[in-house]
Image (cartoon, rainbow, N blue to C red):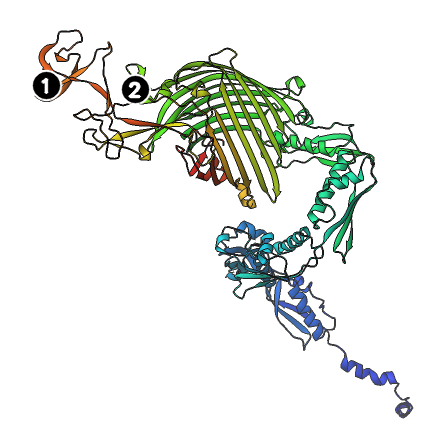
Amino acid sequence: MLSGIVCGTAQAQEVTPPATEAQQTAPAQQQTQQPVIKSLTIEGTQRLEAATVLSYTRLRVGQPYDNASLDQAIKDLHASDLMTVESISGAESGHIVIHIRENPIINRVLLEGNKHLKEDKITPEIHLAPRQIFTRAAVRADVARIVELYRRQGRFAAVVEPQMVQLDQNRVDVVFEITEGPKSKVRQINIIGNEEFSDGELRGEMATKQARFWTILSSNTSYDQDRLAYDQQKLRQFYLTEGYADFRVVSAIAELTPDKRDFIITYVVEEGERYKFGPVTVDSAVRDFDEDRVAASLPFGEGDWYNAQQVEDAVEQLSELAGAYGYAFADVQPEFSRDAETRTMSLNFHIAEANRTYIERIEITGNTQTRDEVIRREFRVAEGDAFNSFMVRRSQDRINSLGYFQEGFEIEQKPGSSPDRIVLGANVEERPTGELTLSAGFSSLERFLVSASIRQRNFRGMGQTLSASVDYSSYSKSVELGFTEPYLFDHNIALGGTLYRRDLNAFNYIGSDRNTTYSQVSTGFQIVSGIPLTEYWTLSGRYNFQLDDVTLDEATFYTDGECDPLKAGRYYCDAIGERITSLIGLSLIFDSLNSRIRPSAGHRLVLGLDFAGLGGDVRYVRGKVDFDKYWSLGSGFIFSTSAEGGYIHSLEDSRGEGIDPVRITDRFWLGEPQFRGFDIRGVGPRVQRLYYSGDPSDGSQALITDQDRIVDDALGGKAYYLTKAELEIPLGAGAREMGLRPSIFVQAGALFNMTRPRPTFTFEQATGPGGELLYNDDGSPTLLPYSTPVTDANGNELYYNTYTNSEGAEAVRLTTCSVGYAADPGDPCVGSASNTAYLNTTQPFFERYVGDTARPRITVGIGVNWNSPFGPLRLDIAKAILTQPGDDPKLVTFNVGTQF
């Protein structure tokens, strides 16, 4: 059996069938199969768990792997920003070991070298922050962001070098070392292709300016990509206003110089042909429009040079005209037809059909203190009225003029519940209307001064004004209380009153010394009322009662208890005394200003007439006119002109030869601050006193003409005029935030028409031994000093003599004895010695009357208003280019700590 088995076996082997194709290829597949991951190990972790690291890869134990899958794992781990893969080992055996280095944690992010761009501007742009993972990619991104910030500031040469300071526990400090470099200026602006206009003319239209020494204070010389695009639009706008309808900017290239300090900008332009207007017509689907009449009212017509700005203005004009007829949503579309052969641009303004619009309601929001009625009463339209754009704009101007709300307030127009309804929205933003001022300051007008005032311009939210003020300086003092109700008993009638006391010390200069001349104390009250006649015309009435007391310092200007003309001048001696003025006045006012606080458009005319004589001691008629007009020139420029003048005529009889019937307290005055370029009361009639020096006995007497030693007394005038033209120049946003408003101006005016005053005194001319008249070396007559006796309280003439006192010293004593001596007046005179008369001696002087002429004085200058931390400041530098004899020019004037 065993044999059989073996055999069987042998036989079986012999009969085994041949292997199949699949059986033949199986060993080959086993030989090329991918290796399998037998284990995965992570080395180098500190904070991270191994499982966390593996979660960022696709590698798993038991899965096949190859070089591509290992490379992908490296990329996945790097992309996590948590670590850096240093190496992978064990790829041959399947026991994979991944060696990593964890990215450090950021401890601090520091900036160094940044001076022009502060940390609060840079830090918000940086993404790196403490306790975040440090990555080089994030650092590079933040470097790019910082560089971009500096580029926006015009510093294209800025360099940012990141530094990493290694700390313990795998922490780092990231330091951005910044080299800011200078601002990259625009060195040159080149324009290619312009033939009709010079490079200079075109550069003048651009916001960007070339860096030159005279533009050192301008911020527009730095390169700005947004400004580059804006300048292209400015060029196109300029050419379109000159008729070049085909103008285009082919290219605008800004090249940075190799040192990154400057830019060179090159524009390539095509001017094209210049066009004229062809036929200009108006096609209106809105009734009430006379198309031919409207077309004739447009500011341009056929044959005029084409001007795109005029077309835009015409669209706005037609829209406002439609709004004035009640069509709030009228659609005005200009339709152009260009003829290249004749180079004309025909234009038709098509006004689409629209429904007449009515005001559905007026919504007032944002007012927390001001009552609705205060705002509503300024609206020139009411709910239910037909819409009128003119009246809506007028309402907006009146609300702005209140001064209670934000600047630039606008009435919003919103669609109503139906196409023919509109809602007017007044979303106001209130600003403080109460003013409490405690200030001390210095002015060229009043020197050191202190002021305290309180005013509420919107008292109780009803638009009432309540004020009280106290001012004190070396030369003026005042106390004033006032109240105004703009709508009396809910009627459009204003009523206000003021109580006041004002002390004024007039003065003159002798050299740099300022000397008080006369003092005026005014106490009184005024009641004012205003009634509107039309939308723009108002009639205002007033009554004023005032007690004036004019005095002179007795110690300085009096002799023997009376005003001495030799010391004060006859004109001041004639002015002293008390008088009561009872005055009634009327003013007719036209006001179309868009704002009474800071107007930029419109005009204001005031015609005033006052009559003093309803009782009291003073009788006169005084007329005055004041006109102001403003234009907004765009881009923040505001041009204004003003003219004022007045005349006063006394109704009293003559007060004596050489005495003007209009008292000094009622006359007009001209000078600082209203006439810039002249000192206080520096224009108009005045008496100048020039003294003689030298000995009249030897011919050396001469007139002192040194300006610093001339006594100059202003007298005022009965007539004056003053005109001004001023251009307010806008500054950058930073200057506006500081409250800086510069301007250039020119002024012309005069003060005149006074009665020539009497000479104060005529001095006696000296005579020689033979009785002949004596003359000085310069040909002027020799004058003798004028002497008057000094008397005691009883009118006795005083004499003086010398004697030896008890101490043996020589002394001087006064007596009423011409010979001898008596200690008390009336006692017998003892002795025979003759005494010397005690005299007041006045040096000879010459008085001249100057300045009484209507010939104009002209000044030009620059000025700036500044809301400084010390209070409002006004600084003017004005040069008087045309003066008259006696005028007192002044180059620089300023005021700090007081309203101007």
Question: Disc number at residue 172?
Answer: none
Question: Disc number at residue 555?
Answer: 2
Q: Secondary structure at mark 2?
A: helix
In the depicted view, which residue is nearer to us: 452 or 660? 660
Name the amino acid, label 2.
Ala
User: Mark 2 or mark 1: which comes first in sequence?
Assistant: 2
21 sits left or right of 822 in the view: right
Q: Where's the N terminus, which quadrant?
A: bottom right
Name the amino acid, label 1.
Asn
As measured in the structure, the alpha-carbon distance from the residue carrying label 2 to the one carrying label 1 is 30 Å
Tell me residue 877's x, y (percent): 45, 40
| Quarter of the view holding residue 736 | top right
Asked whether the viewer can see residue 665, the reply is yes
| Quarter of the view holding residue 488 | top right
Tell me residue 611's x, y (percent): 53, 17
Q: Residue at image x 23%, y 14%?
A: 791
Which residue bears the numbered disc 1? Answer: 805
Tell me residue 860's x, y (percent): 48, 40
Q: Does 692 appear above or below 187?
A: above
Q: Secondary structure at mark 1?
A: loop
In the depicted view, which residue is nearer to us: 580 or 256? 580
